[in-house]
Amino acid sequence: MKSFPGYPESMWPSLEMVEKTRPKRVERAKQGLKVMEPMTLEERDEVLSKYHPDYQPDARKEIRVGPNKGEKLTAKVVDLLESHARVKPNEVDLSDPDFDVDVLIIGGGGAGAQAAIWAMKEGAKNVLLATKLRIGDANSMMSQGGMQAAVNPHDSPVIHWLDIMGGGHFANKPELVKVLTSEAPFITKFLMELGVMWDRDETGHLQTKPGGGTSRRRMLSARDYTGAEIMRVLRDEVKNHPDVITVLEYSPAVELLTDEEGRVAGALLMQTETGEFIVVRAKSTVITTGGFGRLHIKGFPTTNHYGATADGVVLAYRVGAKLRDMDTVQFHPTGAVFPEQIWGFLITEKVRGLGGQPVNKNGELFVFPLEPRDVEAASFIRECARGLGVTTPTGRVGIWLDSPVIEELSGPGTIEKQLPAMLRQFHRFGIDIRKTPMLVYPTLHYQNGGIEINERTETNIPNLFVAGEASGGVHGKNRLMGNSVLDYNVFGRRAGIFAAQNAAKNNIGKKLTLKHVEKWEKELEEAGIKTKRISPILFPDYRNFEILKKHRKEFDPFIGFALTGWQE
Amino acid sequence: MAEQEVLNKEEERKPQAKMVPVFIMGQKYEVPEGSTILNAIEYAGYQLKKGVGCREGFCGACATVYRLPGDYKLRGGLACQTVVQPGMYLAQLPFTPAQKAIYDIDEVKPDITTFQKFYPEAFRCLGCNACSKVCPQELKVMDYIQAIMRGDLELAADLSFDCIMCGLCTMRCPAEMAQYNIALLARRLYGKYMMPKPEFLYKRIEDIEQGKFDKEFEEIMSLSPDELKKRYAERDINFKIT
Ligand SMILES: Cc1cc2nc3c(=O)[nH]c(=O)nc-3n(C[C@H](O)[C@H](O)[C@H](O)COP(=O)(O)OP(=O)(O)OC[C@H]3O[C@@H](n4cnc5c(N)ncnc54)[C@H](O)[C@@H]3O)c2cc1C
Ligand code: SF4
Ligand code: SF4
Ligand code: FES
């Protein structure tokens, strides 16, 4: 039997099958990228309704409090929202704020950095950017595949718009999508002028790749460190303006503050290490706290960074901001399954954009490689349910993502040049993805919905703005790849501009309050919700409870220096 | 309780995982063999608030230094990417004190003079290669610094591209420079001033600003839901470049 370095012997026969079927599949791919017929809308509906986790009977439940009361949302999100506040209103003195600023930005990812830069450009004199970890410790740092922008002659913002609407099951707010696709070329140029090294050909033309659900080549990239490249440039730019922009790290927002009329007027931050409170009064407040991968919905692993716990959604909901599309969850089709140490990690969609093919244990193609994400993910789950997946020594199941096809199509060296992060990730565990495929299964990836915004990134609450993954409306029920990097850049910028303009109007009262928390607690009580949970949870809790429980007759999940303690 | 769900499943999956001793910030713990340093720290009972970010090798928040028993070498690695070894003793470096110059990217010149002005310490490089040896991304750190010393920003940008700014090189450098910040400036200059310009992009932006797509938008946005669905289903898929 042929051996395959990095993989246990039990997986070799299947790997051999993949090698056997490869020449034929490569042949097909060489005649154009459509190696299989894409599904019709009816076929898509069928596989989604039977196999996508969102469509399972227990996936959603009704929320009993707040602005979306009575609607069905993702069950885990409902639990998170139906929780107590971290602070009791009478326990904090808000009369002497530590900061009094024009614009407060909560969350130091890409959206937050763009907002800070553009608030400054728009004339804000002092901008405070508060974040939970370090600035840039964010989902934005991790995107590998790229950003969509219609920059080819036979493409256009209108075609881009149509792709997004269809991918989002037509639930998107059309006017938000129009802004997104129309400002994409501009934001591409803006980033380039800050020094982002977009991949280009010798003439300077931007390199583009296809992506799932797109009808044109439209994915811009910077090798497969696209997010890192953009984020580190934006972070550097933020740090280049210390006279206007102050950055507070390790200081998450734990509650918004309101004035006597219920308008947002700043936030209460908490130093994670010491528990010290920081009171911020702000004329405009922007939430850019990103997504919710670390809620591990339905027990799935996630691609998201450690701070992705939907804090912003919790904070906004409590002051009365409306949510939308919080009933769907994006599972990325290609999360790593083997080796165990990288379980759930993202394998970028670019692998398929470059021609990589999903095949089952017999080496057979079973789905068009570039369906929209939800359809692609559901198809993988179906293939495994049919018994055509591959099992690992620890009992996980996945299907193969045949990466060696890429070099057969585009020549040796392509993977090293285009996918250095992936190559390195697997190389660390002895697998060479130029020669052997990767085993993959869907992983929890993206918060499709969020706090509802309009084109000016305003919410239904005065002085409260939202941008990036925390917002809702742009992507409808399903986001297509490359559009969230675009989203946080386009709407992060807009949030900065409109928040600065709003700050100039000075629409806040003198007094800071936590009245909304009082109201919230009352609502919980009236709805008969009894729970020990508190939110925002700030961090997931991966401590080994067995060890912590040792010798204790009673166990308090808040033991030690934990911030979460999220137990019923 | 999702976190626990996941963790518990892990536990069931590997009930008899072999345990190995590690010393975390000087304290001894038994952790499952094959864990990453990050998982080991959490297994030992810590809920991290610093020293962790992406958990996937992209953010550089989890820089860690360690020694192995009987080995004089001080090694560096990313906690989220490095598997524990028996007897390893380690300390996390959640933060690197480092110099970052303040500059106006629209004003600086893409040549060696910029570095002489903002990062004169770069020119003190001793060529010891300690930086390259410790880099968890296996970058040729010394080579990119020396490229900058020669004014070869293109090479420096290329060699440093995969830098995740973890700070490990900086902590080892006898010339006391922050290589990663210096390289970032080189890449920004290269990306902004030296890479060829995408002419068509400017044209596209002009077209949009002049309202060239307004009519089409108006038309498509006025379609009924059914018409829109039809339009979507019938759209042509064309992956050619032009
Ligand atoms: C592995 C991975 C790969 C991806 N690849 C792509 C891709 O190729 N193309 C694409 O378009 N999209 C991709 N995405 C999605 C995209 O990267 C994200 O949706 C986007 O970066 C979100 O940006 P953001 O600024 O809204 O949020 P983030 O970048 O996540 O930033 C949010 C920040 O807020 C902080 N924060 C959270 N709570 C609080 C609080 N209470 N107080 C203060 N701060 C807080 C967080 O710690 C974080 O720093 C990917 C995502 C992941 C995880
Ligand atoms: S060059 Fe330095 S900062 Fe960058 S990844 Fe390597 S060791 Fe870390
Ligand atoms: S560690 Fe410092 S002095 Fe030594 S080679 Fe690297 S940059 Fe030069
Ligand atoms: S946590 Fe980001 S590199 Fe390890």
Image (cartoon, coloured by chain):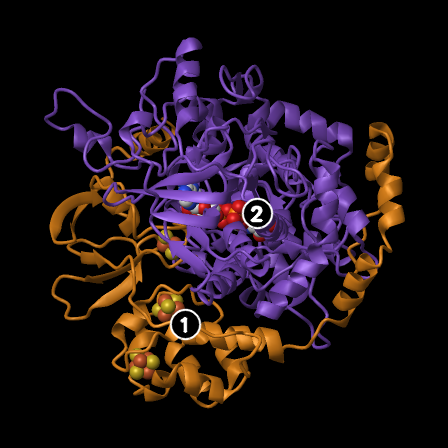
Chain colours: A purple, B orange
Answer left or right for A339 relative to A55: left
Q: For the residues marked 1 and 2, what is the alpha-carbon distance in whole angstroms? A: 30 Å
| Other residues around mark 2 within 10 Å, as few (<14) / some (14–19) / many (≥20) | many
Q: Does the residue labelled 1 lie within 8 Å of ligand 2?
A: no
Tell me which corner region of the image, top left, top right, bottom left or bottom right, holds residue A145: bottom right
Percent coordinates x, y for residue A53 in the rendering: 55, 27
Q: Residue at x 36, y 88 (%)?
A: B123
Q: Can residue A301 be seen in this view?
A: no
Going by the numbered disc 2, the residue's amino acid type is: Ala
Residue B25 versus residue A553 in the image, above or below: below
The residue positioned 81% from the left and 48% from the top of the image is A158
Where, quadrant-wise, is the C terminus of chain A in this rendering? top left
The residue identified by callout 2 is: A499
Percent position (x, y) of residue A520?
A: 43, 20
Secondary structure under tag 2 reads helix
Of residue B181 and residue B174, the one placed in the foreground of this image is B181
Residue B109: where, in percent of width, then height? 55, 83
| Residue A19 on image: x %, y % | 58, 53
Picture layout, residue A147 above or below residue B16: below
- Disc number for residue B181: 1
